[in-house]
Image (spheres, rainbow, N blue to C red):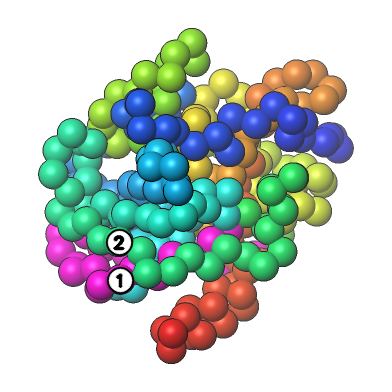
């Protein structure tokens, strides 16, 4: 079935402001503390002093991956965090952000970004990078899940505190393939504030970046969109290499 995602009704692309705690995922469950050591809470600081939040994930000791729509004036990255009221294992400022040069804020195409840390992440049991999938044979990865601190109550912006996770089943769809997206459908999925987190599948690799949700024009059901990582392998590699020399 061919459809067009109604990007006028975006949920995930709206990041959380400092008046709420980032917490739960729709239909999800709390993960075992520190069982997702690659997860990052990204604080976005604006010129007017406001702070918003996105998710992200650690690629290596110097870089974090997130969504391009999570851009801000500056960033603080929390590593090894479970409860947002607790103390992060490490808290590191960002040196520079590298959104994809063809990112479109209008329709969220190429919604992927790398962030270089000012100091190296120190790996431990609770802080560890995740490998990203670098090949796309056209088949859909199986047994996928999304973690994050995004809102849980559809009728409120108040957030729970712990890192949450939800299982998602990816769907075959021509529009998603054309847009270089993985998509899932249904009531359960990532929510506002989960943007930038990883779509992790059965082999433990990151296959996508949480981007947006909207409604299907045909039946009004909810669609969740994840920027595919494999098509951006060349961009990721070249960006990492050039950024290392800055």
Toward which corner of the image does residue 91 lie, by quadrant?
Answer: bottom left
In this rendering, the answer to whether 28 lies above or below 109 is above
Point out the stretch of residues depicted in magenta.
112-136
Counting from the top left corner in percent of width and height, residue 200 is at 45, 51
Q: Is residue 179 visible?
A: yes
Residue under the point 18% across and 69% down: 122
Q: Is residue 105 magenta?
A: no
- In-image side of 61 versus 27 (left or right): left
In this rendering, the answer to whether 221 lies above or below 228 is above
Q: Is residue 116 magenta?
A: yes
Between residue 119 and residue 2, name the one nearer to us.
Answer: 119
Identify residue for label 1: 118
Counting from the top left corner in percent of width and height, residue 102 is at 71, 64
Residue under the point 51% across and 49% down: 70
Toward which corner of the image does residue 121 lie, by quadrant?
Answer: bottom left
Identify residue for label 2: 93
Q: For the residue labelled by badge 2, is the local secondary structure a helix, a strand or a loop? A: strand
In this rendering, the answer to whether 10 lies above or below 92 is above
- In-image side of 124 versus 27 (left or right): left
Toward which corner of the image does residue 175 lie, by quadrant?
Answer: top right
Q: Main secondary structure of the magenta part?
A: loop
Q: For the residue labelled by badge 1, is the local secondary structure a helix, a strand or a loop? A: loop
Quadrant containing the C terminus is bottom left
Check the image and name the residue furthest to the top.
155
Residue under the point 35% across and 26% down: 20
Tell me if mark 2 has few (under 14), some (14-19) or many (20+) residues whose alpha carbon lies within 10 angstroms of its own.
Answer: some
CB under 8 Å between callouts 1 and 2?
yes
Counting from the top left corner in percent of width and height, residue 98 is at 53, 68
């Amino acid at each position: 079935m061919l459809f067009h995602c109604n990007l006028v009704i975006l949920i995930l692309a709206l990041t959380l402001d400092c008046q709420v705690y980032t917490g739960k995922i729709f239909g999800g469950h709390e993960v075992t503390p520190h069982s997702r050591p690659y997860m990052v809470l990204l604080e976005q600081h604006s010129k007017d002093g406001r702070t918003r939040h996105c998710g992200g994930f650690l690629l290596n000791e110097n870089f974090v991956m997130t969504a391009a729509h999570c851009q801000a004036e500056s960033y603080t990255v929390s590593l090894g965090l479970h409860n947002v009221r607790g103390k992060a294992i490490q808290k590191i400022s960002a040196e520079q952000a590298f959104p994809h040069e063809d990112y479109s804020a209008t329709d969220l195409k190429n919604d992927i970004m790398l962030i270089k840390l000012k100091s190296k992440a120190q790996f431990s049991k609770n802080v560890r990078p995740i490998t990203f999938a670098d090949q796309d044979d056209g088949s859909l990865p199986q047994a996928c899940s999304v973690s994050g601190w995004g809102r849980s109550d559809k009728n409120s912006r108040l957030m729970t505190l712990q890192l949450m996770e939800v299982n998602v089943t990816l769907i075959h769809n021509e529009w998603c393939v054309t847009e270089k997206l993985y998509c899932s459908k249904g009531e359960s999925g990532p929510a506002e504030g989960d943007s930038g987190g990883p779509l992790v599948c059965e082999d433990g690799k990151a296959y996508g970046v949480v981007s947006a949700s909207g409604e299907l024009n045909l039946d009004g059901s909810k669609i969740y969109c994840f920027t595919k990582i494999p098509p951006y392998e060349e961009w990721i590699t070249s960006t990492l290499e050039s950024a290392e020399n800055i």
